Image (cartoon, rainbow, N blue to C red):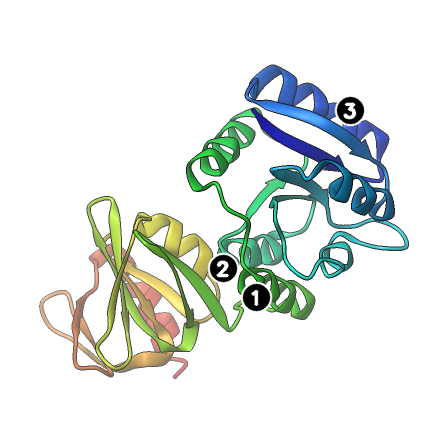
């Protein structure tokens, strides 16, 4: 069984998550439910749970401040939040679990599945990356966590030249010639990197607009990146790209 603690200052949110867990996640055992971060810290130290469902916005001490009270996390964290899309992107960049309120049962089941497979607490670097991204509230955080077969690689987004779909995987090509294969489809990467800097020019390619070297007209047109890679642009995205390209 997975031992969990729920921390949320809103009683109805605690009760709803309690019901969802009992209904859709029978492998999870709730050992404590707390309506404040201060009480949450006490219960975490007492029960040493496997996972904490943590609300971010709470009075006196929010979820981020609570986590900073621990020198090292020995439990996994699932953030429960009603934050907007830019803050949600921060969770994707840091590769941390989150559930958007109101919580969808399918999202909850998928989150529990990931926790069961991973079975480890988030690293301090992941937490720091999340704090940095959310607190700055930038549409495009400066770094992203790329999940690979043997762990995570943290890269700056400005170093990403383009991403290429490869079946159920995605190759992320960086400056310097490094290529990282991640176990995510390109759609997931596109959602995490969506914003003013990245653009999906083709079903198979997502490019960093800041790394374009030139655009070549001709048979449909193609893009040359600053590492001299040639990227195909689809006919359906060409005009939108041209409109953006004209602004450079």
Residue 17, x across and y down, in percent:
70, 27
Residue 166, x across and y down, in percent:
19, 51
Q: Residue furthest right?
A: 60
Front-most of residues 22 and 150: 150
117 relative position to 138: left or right: left
Mark 1 Cα-neighbour bin, 10 Å: few <14, some 14–19, many ≥20: many
Asked if labels 1 and 3 touch by Cβ distance under 8 angstroms, the answer is: no
Secondary element at tag 2: helix
Q: Earlier in the sequence, mark 2 or mark 1?
A: 2
Secondary element at tag 3: helix
List the residue tagged with mark 2. 93
List the residue tagged with mark 1. 129
Residue 17 visible in image: no
Secondary element at tag 1: helix
Q: Which residue is rendered at x = 44% and y = 53% of the image?
A: 191
For marks 2 and 1, give the CA distance.
8 Å
Mark 2 Cα-neighbour bin, 10 Å: few <14, some 14–19, many ≥20: many
Q: Earlier in the sequence, mark 3 or mark 2?
A: 3
List the residue tagged with mark 3. 15
Quadrant of the rendering where the N terminus is positioned? top right
Asked if labels 1 and 2 touch by Cβ distance under 8 angstroms, the answer is: yes
Q: Which residue is rendered at x = 55% and y = 21% of the image?
A: 27
80 relative position to 9: left or right: left
Residue 216 visible in image: yes
177 relative position to 141: left or right: left
Q: Which residue is rendered at x = 60% and y = 37% of the image?
A: 50
């Amino acid at each position: 069984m997975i031992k969990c603690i729920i921390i949320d200052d809103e009683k109805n949110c605690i009760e709803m998550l309690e019901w969802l867990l009992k209904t859709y996640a029978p492998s999870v055992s709730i050992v404590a439910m707390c309506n404040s971060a201060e009480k949450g810290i006490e219960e975490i130290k007492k029960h040493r749970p496997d996972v904490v469902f943590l609300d971010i916005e709470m009075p006196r001490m929010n979820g981020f401040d609570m986590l900073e009270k621990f020198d090292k996390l020995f439990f996994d964290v699932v953030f429960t939040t009603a934050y907007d899309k830019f803050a949600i992107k921060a969770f994707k960049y840091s590769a941390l679990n989150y559930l958007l309120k109101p919580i969808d049962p399918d999202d909850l089941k998928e989150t529990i599945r990931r926790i069961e497979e991973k079975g480890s607490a988030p690293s301090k670097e992941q937490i720091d990356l999340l704090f940095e991204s959310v607190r700055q509230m930038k549409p495009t955080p400066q770094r992203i966590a790329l999940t690979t077969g043997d762990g995570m690689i943290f890269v700056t987004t400005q170093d990403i030249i383009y991403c290429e779909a490869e079946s159920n995987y995605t190759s992320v090509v960086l400056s310097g010639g490094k290529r990282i294969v991640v176990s995510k489809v390109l759609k997931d990467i596109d959602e995490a990197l969506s914003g003013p800097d990245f653009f999906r020019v083709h079903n198979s390619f997502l490019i960093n607009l800041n790394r374009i070297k030139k655009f070549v007209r001709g048979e449909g047109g193609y893009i040359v990146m600053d590492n001299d890679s040639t990227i195909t642009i689809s006919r359906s995205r060409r005009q939108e790209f041209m409109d953006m390209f004209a602004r450079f």
